[in-house]
Amino acid sequence: MGPDFTLDDAQEAIVRLAGEVLGDSDGDGSAGRCWASLGQAGLLGLAVPAELGGAGLGPMATGLLLTEVGRCAAGVPAWSTLSLGVLPVVRWGSPDQQRELLSAVPAGRVLTGAPHAEVTATGGGRLTGTCRAVPDADRAHRILVPVGETVALVDPAAPGVTILPTPGGFALRLASAAAEPLGDGKADLERYAVAGACALGDGALAGALRMTAAHVRDRHQFGRPLATFQAVAQQIADVYVASRTMHLAALAASWSVERDDGGDTDLWTAAYWLCAEVLPALRTCHHLHGGLGLAADYPLHRHTALVRDLIRYVGGAEYCLDRLGASDVHRAE
């Protein structure tokens, strides 16, 4: 028998509270207010240890919150702070590092990480190299950078660290920059990053589906709601199937990472679905909006832009297939 993803009372409360906090969001235009409100509601501290003012929960609770953030495509640094920052620090950081980095997260401190880095240690705790696609690097207190099989902490304001704006985000250039090892052992930043990206993408598609369903229900053509036309009904049904599949896959990915059983099949299955199926579903949503779907100021574009960024961070469909294949081989052995 497979896992039961029915939410318990605490998880239902997280979803409900996040929905209430984000319900009035108008996306990027109210990002600062949304971020502050999430902190005031205690949601930014879900995975922060209780002794540091958080709830002491894990990837599942974090994923549920990220799904709600994605549902309204709010431009807040939730994925970067929670998946790329808080979860790895809780898992591998020393007690002193946890106190220094996490105590201010419930109040809105931003952390981030660089899932894709080409960095080498040059001795004396210094790093040289580049990190591409580093979300929210411009406002982060610390950046987690993979170095071989470990992760290092980099201060973005330190000498030798240059933040470079790129389309949809930032890159990082390190030139003999000082760094601090995160804990003592091997740290896998990518697993938390991918699980969180899938949860956020799940919400982005669900929000777009909700917006599109309302549009075809209320928009009339030839005196009939668009939803009553067979072609429209079939297309919205396809988006619904893609969305529900993404939701189940995202839950399975978060569940797998929370169990930390070493199996990544669920994780990379969800990542592949995000990369291969969510964008086509979003294109259908734009199509069903007609001319409105082309308007740059219509909120549907925020959902599509968010998913495009997430796909770039995750690595794309072919990369996910390669990782999925490697995971299956590892499990067979």
Image (cartoon, grey):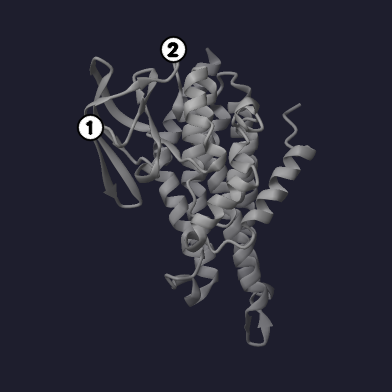
Q: Quadrant of residue 288?
A: bottom right
The location of residue 330, given as percent across then percent down, is: 50, 17
Spot occupied by residue 95 in the image (x, y as percentages of width and height): 52, 18
224, 119: nearer the viewer: 119
Q: Is residue 307 above or below residue 179?
A: below
Within 10 Å of disc 1 (Cα), the crowding (few <14, some 14-19, many 20+) is few
Question: The residue under label 2 is which amino acid type?
Answer: Asp
Q: Amino acid at mark 1?
A: Pro
Q: Quadrant of residue 55?
A: top right
Q: Secondary structure at mark 2?
A: loop
Q: Residue 9 appears in which quarter of the rendering?
A: top right
Q: What residue is pinned by disc 1?
A: 159
Task: Write the residue at 47% across / 22% down.
Answer: 97
Label 2 or label 1, whichever lies nearer to me, is 1
Q: How many marks?
A: 2
Q: Nearer the viewer, residue 213 or 222?
A: 213
Asked whether residue 167 is in view, the answer is yes
Q: Residue at x 64, y 56 (%)?
A: 240
Secondary structure, mark 1, is loop
Mark identifier at residue 184? 2
Which mark sits nearer the N-terminus, 2 or 1? 1
- Where does the image place residue 120, in percent across and percent down from the top left? 25, 21
Q: Is residue 195 left or right of residue 136?
A: right
Q: How many residues crowd around disc 2 within 10 Å: few (fewer than 14), some, or many (20 or more)?
A: few
Asked if one can make out residue 324 in the rendered structure from this viewpoint, the answer is no
